[in-house]
Image (tube, helix red, strand yellow):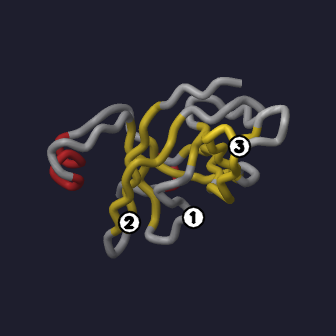
Amino acid sequence: MRTLKRNQRKVYYADRIKTEVVKDEYGNPTGEHRVIYGTPQPLWVNVSAAKGEYLLRQFGELENYDRALTMGSSHPLTEQSVLWIDHDDISKPHDYRVTRIAESLNSTVALVKKVSVGG
């Protein structure tokens, strides 16, 4: 019931491809790293409005998240994926990141956290 087509909406996700070292204008490493993500892809999922008691027990009592995504058992998300949920303009920075994934026999729930990315 949680993954009915009529309850799903389109969001975009991108997976982490690699991490590269940031260098200064002289080519020296600065000690910082930049994460490179792949091309955003569409994904149809059920997006919750807010936290719920059911999810608190499923993931433990201290998990910090803003929304939950419910999808079928076959999904492309990882705990390093980023998402565009509140807007579908993928030319802008992502607005959520996956914090936890819980898989069961018939469905998967991913907890996501709102992030602020400059750009």
Viewer-side residue, 14 vs 53: 14
Q: Work out which quarter of the rendered image holds the C terminus and state it.
A: top right
Count of numbered tags: 3
Q: CA distance from mark 1 to mark 3?
A: 33 Å
Q: Is residue 55 above or below residue 101?
A: above
Residue for badge 3: 29
Left or right: 56 in relation to 36: left
Q: CA distance from mark 1 to mark 2?
A: 13 Å
Left or right: 119 in relation to 108: right
Classify mark 2: helix, strand or loop: strand
Q: Is residue 85 above or below residue 60?
A: above
Left or right: 70 in relation to 74: left
Q: In terms of sequence position, does the residue under pointer 1 or pointer 2 come before the other?
A: 1
- Residue 53 % position (x, y): 17, 41
Q: Circle 2: is it few (<14), some (14-19), or many (20+) Cα within 10 Å?
A: some
- Residue 68 % position (x, y): 38, 44
Going 61% across and 45% down the picture, which residue do you hit? 10
Q: Is residue 75 above or below residue 28?
A: below
Viewer-side residue, 62 vs 35: 35
Residue for badge 2: 107
Give the number of the disc on residue 6. Answer: none
Viewer-side residue, 90 vs 70: 90
Check disc 1 and give the amino acid type: Pro
The reply to whether callout 1 and callout 2 are in contact (CB within 8 Å) is: no
Going 39% across and 62% down the picture, which residue do you hit? 108
Residue for badge 1: 76
Classify mark 3: helix, strand or loop: strand
- Please name which of the two marks, 2 or 3, marks the residue nearer to the observer: 3
Q: In terms of sequence position, does the residue under pointer 2 or pointer 3 come before the other?
A: 3
Q: Quadrant of residue 106?
A: bottom left
Going 18% across and 51% down the picture, which residue do you hit? 60
Q: Circle 1: is it few (<14), some (14-19), or many (20+) Cα within 10 Å?
A: few
